[in-house]
Image (cartoon, helix red, strand yellow):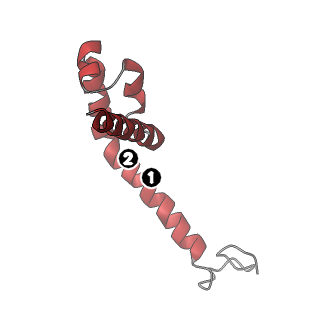
Amino acid sequence: MTNNATATDGTFDARNGSDRSSVLGQIGSVLRSLITFPQRRAVRDELSNLSDRELADIGLTRADVAHVFDTEFVARREATQQTLRSARRAAA
């Protein structure tokens, strides 16, 4: 018996369902990406059409547009905004 979900004779080993759920999770992730791609592309296109001034008004730069759906970028941006809000409250 191997560590994957297939027994040595090529049949599925139901005792090791974690591999199966992992594959299903990956398939679900790919499907979600495919479904949301058109919407994400439309948002990027709209942001790309804004002027530098308009982007600055919403707190973005032209370089940020390519990263607006990157989770690390979003987390860093939110942390920066939280720091700025705290500093403004402390100064007031």
Amino acid under disc 2? Leu
Looking at the image, is 70 positioned above or below residue 13?
Answer: above
Would residue 8 appear left or right of 80 to someone viewing this image?
A: right
- Tell me where residue 47 sits by quadrant: top left
* Residue that label 1 marks: 30
Which quadrant would residue 89 be assigned to in this image? top left
Asked whether 80 or 12 is in front, the reply is 80
Q: Residue at x 32, y 37 (%)?
A: 90
Work out which quarter of the rendered image holds the C terminus and state it: top left
Q: Nearer the viewer, residue 51 or 53?
A: 53
Determine which residue is flagged by label 2.
34
In front: 25, or 56? 56
Q: Dot 1: what SS? A: helix
- Spatial separation of the CA atoms under disc 2 and disc 1: 6 Å
The residue located at (34%, 40%) in the rendering is 86
The answer to whether residue 51 is visible is: no
